[in-house]
Image (cartoon, rainbow, N blue to C red):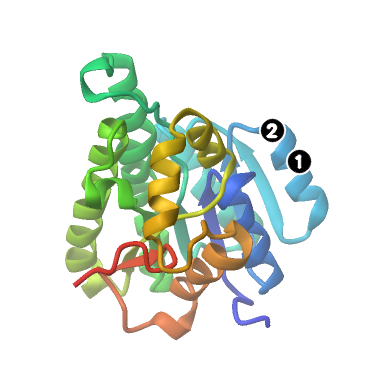
């Protein structure tokens, strides 16, 4: 399926994990991708897998200059920008009262600030192409998961930001949607080791009784949201979580 031919997409955290899976699937479907990540080795591997369609930019997404550089790179190499996927987010899992100022700064800077930086940098180009933005929320924010205060707070802030942008930018032809994944990434594996009871609780309540696969279960939903098939959707939160949270 090559339904993304002609699309040029920035993916933050696009070298590994869910972001890496998204980069792979988008390229397989015909898109050109700029993957922005701090993981240089993984980034080089992505480029080597498809050098004609994938570019890598090493950078800290919390810095506004990196967002501007990513947009400039997409336009200079591929001629335009049609979509932005804000996947990257770093955080530390601790009880609320144990989170330090540095812990809060890490989550807010890489999550909310990073998402905002890239949205603002991409806006002029996405206005030209009537483009699409996919931001990432989390079930941790929706249910208030223990030990996730800084992460949950940033994710819910991202959802609020996304809804405002969806309303303001609709007249510019830009769509903004949110995906909340439940996927077995390296980060989730570490969380499972530290909080096995929470992991088993999540699995036990999930209708499909499993965490999703980043490439097979999550990336195709993101690919749909940046395709023309979702042209009448904006301001929505889609749960890519096996029915774990069923929004009303």
- Crowd around label 2: few <14 · some 14–19 · many ≥20 (10 Å): some
* Residue, disc 1: 44
- Which x, y percent locates residue 217? 55, 66
* Residue, disc 2: 40
Q: Residue at 53%, 54% (x, y): give it.
A: 10
Q: Quadrant of residue 232?
A: bottom left
Q: Is residue 56 left or right of residue 12?
A: right
**In the foreground, 181 or 224:** 181
Q: Quadrant of residue 171?
A: bottom left
Up-down relation of residue 164 to residue 112 (above or below): below
Q: Residue at 28%, 31% (x, y): give it.
A: 150
Q: Secondary structure at mark 2?
A: helix
What is the spatial separation of the Cα atoms under label 1 and label 2, in whole angstroms? Answer: 6 Å
**In the foreground, 181 or 246:** 246
For this orientation, the residue located farthest to the right is: 48
Q: Is residue 222 left or right of residue 233?
A: right
Q: Is residue 36 left or right of residue 109?
A: right
- Which x, y percent locates residue 13? 54, 43
Q: Quadrant of residue 117?
A: top left
Q: Is residue 109 left or right of residue 22?
A: left
Q: Quadrant of the N terminus?
A: bottom right
Q: Residue at 24%, 52% (x, y): give it.
A: 142
Q: Are marks 1 and 2 in contact (CB under 8 Å)?
A: yes
Q: Residue at 40%, 32% (x, y): give it.
A: 62
């Amino acid at each position: 399926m090559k339904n993304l031919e002609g699309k040029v997409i920035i993916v933050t955290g696009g070298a590994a994990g869910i972001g890496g899976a998204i980069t792979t699937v988008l390229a397989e479907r015909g898109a050109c991708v700029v993957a922005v990540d701090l993981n240089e080795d993984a980034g080089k591997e992505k480029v080597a897998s498809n050098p004609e369609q994938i570019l890598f930019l090493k950078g800290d997404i919390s810095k506004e200059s990196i967002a501007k550089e990513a947009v400039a790179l997409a336009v200079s190499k591929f001629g335009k920008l049609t979509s932005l996927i804000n996947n990257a987010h770093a955080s530390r899992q601790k009880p609320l009262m144990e989170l330090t100022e540095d812990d809060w700064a890490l989550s807010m800077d890489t999550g909310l600030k990073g998402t905002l930086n890239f949205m603002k940098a991409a806006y002029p180009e996405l206005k030209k192409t009537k483009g699409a933005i996919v931001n990432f929320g989390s079930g941790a924010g929706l249910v208030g998961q223990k030990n996730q205060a800084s992460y949950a707070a940033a994710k819910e802030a991202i959802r609020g930001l996304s809804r405002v942008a969806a309303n303001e930018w609709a007249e510019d032809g830009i769509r903004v949607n949110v995906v909340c994944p439940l996927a077995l990434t390296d980060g989730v594996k570490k969380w499972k080791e530290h909080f096995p009871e929470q992991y088993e609780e999540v699995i036990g309540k999930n209708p499909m009784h499993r965490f999703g696969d980043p490439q097979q279960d999550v990336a195709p939903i993101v690919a749909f949201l940046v395709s023309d098939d979702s042209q009448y959707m904006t301001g929505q939160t889609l749960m890519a979580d096996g029915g774990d949270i069923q929004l009303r």
